[in-house]
Image (cartoon, rainbow, N blue to C red):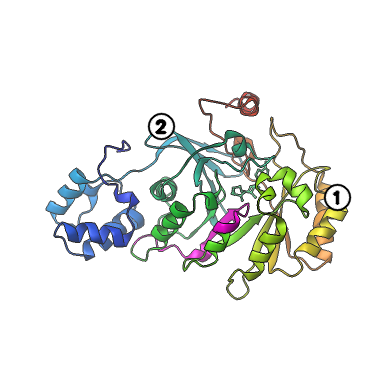
Amino acid sequence: MNVNDGRPDLAELDCAALEAVLVDRGYERFRAKQIFAWIYRHGVLDAASMSDLPATLRTLLATDFRLSTPSVTSRERSSDGTEKFLLGLSDGLHIESVFIPDTPAMTLCVSTQVGCAMACAFCLTGKMGLVRNLTAAEIVGQVRVLTHELQLQSSPFNIVLMGMGEPLHNYDETMKALRIMASEHGMALPMRRVTLSTVGVLPALERLAREPLMPNLAISLHAPTDAQRGQLVPINKKYGIEDIIEVCKRFPLKRRARITFEYVLLAGVNDAQEDARKLARLLSGVKAKINIIPLNAAAGIPFERPSDGTIDRFARILSERGALVSVRKSRGRDIRAACGQLIVEGRRQSPAQRLAVAAFGG
Ligand code: SAH
């Protein structure tokens, strides 16, 4: 089922495209909606199970099309209930997706690329470099597989695009995936349940601001000045903080909505009291909430997590200045499923990656 044999992939078609294909072959338009419901609402993995379709159409789907679905290579469960899925793609590459229960919602953390080109200094995925973009089918496929494995089809869940990869560096496929998931005939996922996290690829961020389909936005900021951020997030040298904040100020937000600013706290690097004061000043004119993420340390990552006292003090300075602050509780660290810990052992491993794999016995 996972081999790309050249047949069109049903998982790559949004509902309008599927309608066009079916009408082209002499079938009624509404069949597309039925097929969408089977794939995305009922989670079926093959056309034979789509029992309300005419037999001829079922045969056509089974012979002339394929329905690609990532395969579950492994599944690990953390002591806190978080589960990490290693998923196999049709070309043999792997990605990771994470299920985080009770946050209080059920949350699926989904990847948008194999590896990542952003090379943030504290992120293990960044050490892999970019291997390739995921297709929309592979992005939605993670959700199809996880909801199936976890039997979540009929319960509400949130999606965070915070797995491997930079979603705005794979803009078209990411947005297509959101369109497929939002389709009322399929998953009907409301965009208020989706959060897109980005380092702030500026042209793509401006494009996002004009989209009809609008997920919640999270910006990986991590430092209050360009000098500091440039050391941690290399793309900041191209798209600096001022420009990102400017776009954020103009970003169309629903009433009461806020942009999340993620701030990975690194001991001795960006955790000074002065940094907190600068951060509060920087975000004072933005409808923001700040999410502090104490570093998830790993072998090969040359930073340390600050003490609990430092984390509390940093958060307190921000809230005393009127900012909305939360400190992210790290989940799944014992199975390397926490933020920045997603990495897949490739053929060409960097020294840091080899180290990380050795240290964790992966
Ligand atoms: N590329 C996107 C989405 C993936 S990362 C982005 O950068 O936003 C999701 C979040 O995890 C980001 O805020 C990222 O900076 C953070 N992160 C990466 N490595 C981390 C680590 N070692 N510890 C804690 N958070 C980390």
Residue 320 position within the rendered picture, expressed as x and y whole percent measured from the top left: 84, 65
Q: Amino acid at mark 2?
A: Gly
Secondary structure of residue under mark 1: loop
The crowd level at tag 1 (other Cα within 10 Å; few <14, some 14-19, many 20+) is some
Does the beta carbon of the residue at mark 2 sit less than 8 Å from ligand 1? Answer: no
Where is 126 relative to 112, above or below?
above
Mark 2 to mark 1 CA distance (whole Å): 44 Å
Mark seen at residue 272: 1
Q: Nearer the viewer, residue 114 or 169?
A: 169
Residue 358 position within the rendered picture, expressed as x and y whole percent measured from the top left: 62, 23
Is residue 236 left or right of 7 when viewed as pictured?
Answer: right
Magenta stretch: includes residue 149: no
Question: Does residue 316 appear in this view?
Answer: no
Is residue 67 left or right of 270 when viewed as pictured?
Answer: left
Mark 2, residue position: 92
Is residue 307 left or right of 255 when viewed as pictured?
Answer: right
